[in-house]
Image (cartoon, rainbow, N blue to C red):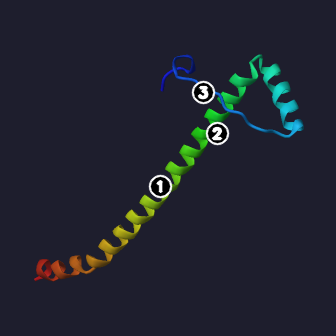
Amino acid sequence: MLPTTQREKVRINIQLPSEIKDKLFHASSRQGKKVSAFVRESIEEKLLQVDRQIFEERMKVAYQDLAEENLHLSEEFKFSDVENLTEVIS
């Protein structure tokens, strides 16, 4: 991902309750950042969280599918050792 300064920037307008706007300006001031930088970083963090959550959900489904497949395979071969055991004993 390119640094923010090298990416094309677009302007968007959002509406916030005045209490959130006040908290936003206060928090960005405490961080020593411009409001736009603070909001941009916050959005980027949230998007990473959403991407991570989607990835984890997909991995969970994949692991569950794999577990079901492994269970099915183990059921198919559960008697294979017994079949060969009689030949070894004889």
Task: Tell me the kind of residue under disc 3.
Answer: Val
- Which numbered circle lies on residue 49? none
Task: Tell me the kind of residue under disc 1.
Answer: Arg
Cα distance, mark 1 to mark 2? 18 Å
Local secondary structure at mark 1: helix
Local secondary structure at mark 3: loop
Decide if residue 5 is on the left or right side of residue 85. right
**Quarter of the figure that contains the C terminus:** bottom left
According to the picture, the residue beneath numbered tag 3 turns out to be 10
Q: Where 58 falls versus 33 (above or below)?
A: below
Mark found first going from the N terminus, 3 or 1: 3
- Which numbered circle lies on residue 46? 2
Contact (CB < 8 A) between labels 3 and 1?
A: no
* Label 1: few (<14), some (14–19) or many (≥20) C-alpha neighbours in 10 Å: few
Q: Nearer the viewer, residue 70 or 35?
A: 35
Contact (CB < 8 A) between labels 2 and 3?
A: no
Image spot of residue 31 (x, y percent): 77, 20
Image spot of residue 41 (x, y percent): 65, 28
